[in-house]
Amino acid sequence: MKSQAKKKADIEKLVLGGILTALVVVLQYMGSFIKFGPFSISLVLIPIVIGAATCSTKISTWLGFVFSVVVLALDASAFFAISVPGTIITVLAKGTACGLTAGLVYKLLHKKNEYAAVIASAIVCPITNTGIFLLGCVVFFFKTIQEWGVGAGYANAIEYMFLGLAGGNFLFEMATNIVLCPVIIRILNIRKKNK
């Protein structure tokens, strides 16, 4: 039988996971209106990393999955027009995997140094998200990506993928994650100590 303290901790994680889930939906919805180049900026990676650090790998994976579902509903129309299965596979894989890898990296490193674990998770989350997106572009959408690249004035599809589709978004996501995630965890830890 679980102790009262363990039950309370589990309930707190579940509630925080629910709050982070709602935050993922709201941030992705609002982020779909904030464009950086042709695609929206994924501010939702921040609550995914926070979920990895405060709840569990299961919760961060769930948050990544929710992120994927919202992207499919709001931001994937250009890719749906090319390949429905390719879009679904790419978007579900990139979101879910970024939550999973953020959780696994945090779990692996947090006993040595919590803030180093948060920063590492904040780095691996956008790398996974963007890496799987680019891989999906090559596997499912390459011919269209080539056409888009030529139309946008790029020398080739790879240059367009890195500089046109993903480059600016990736750098913004990485910077915001690295700066904000440790700050948010620090604030949550201070609050926890003052309970």
Image (cartoon, rainbow, N blue to C red):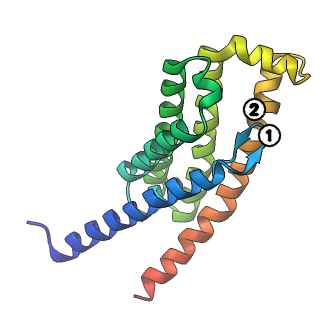
Question: Residue at position x 61%, y 57% from top?
Answer: 119
Residue at 38% from the left image edge and 55% from the top image edge? 56
Q: Locate residue 167, reporting x and y percent.
A: 78, 37
Q: Secondary structure at mark 2?
A: helix
The residue labelled by disc 1 is 37
User: Label 1 amino acid?
Assistant: Gly
The vertical placement of 16 against 34, above or below, is: below
The answer, for residue 5, to whether it is visible in the render is yes
- Left or right of residue 41: residue 94: left
Q: Which residue is painted at 52% across and 41% down in the image?
A: 98
Could you tell me which residue is drawn at 26 percent across and 66 percent down? 10
Residue 3 percent coordinates (x, y) = 15, 73
Which kind of residue does numbered mark 2 sit on? Leu
Mark 2 near mark 1, Cβ–Cβ under 8 Å?
Answer: yes
User: In the figure, 92 relative to 155: above or below?
Assistant: below
Residue behind mark 2:
165
Relative vertical location of residue 142 with respect to residue 135 in this rendering, above or below: above
Picture quadrant where residue 169 is located: top right
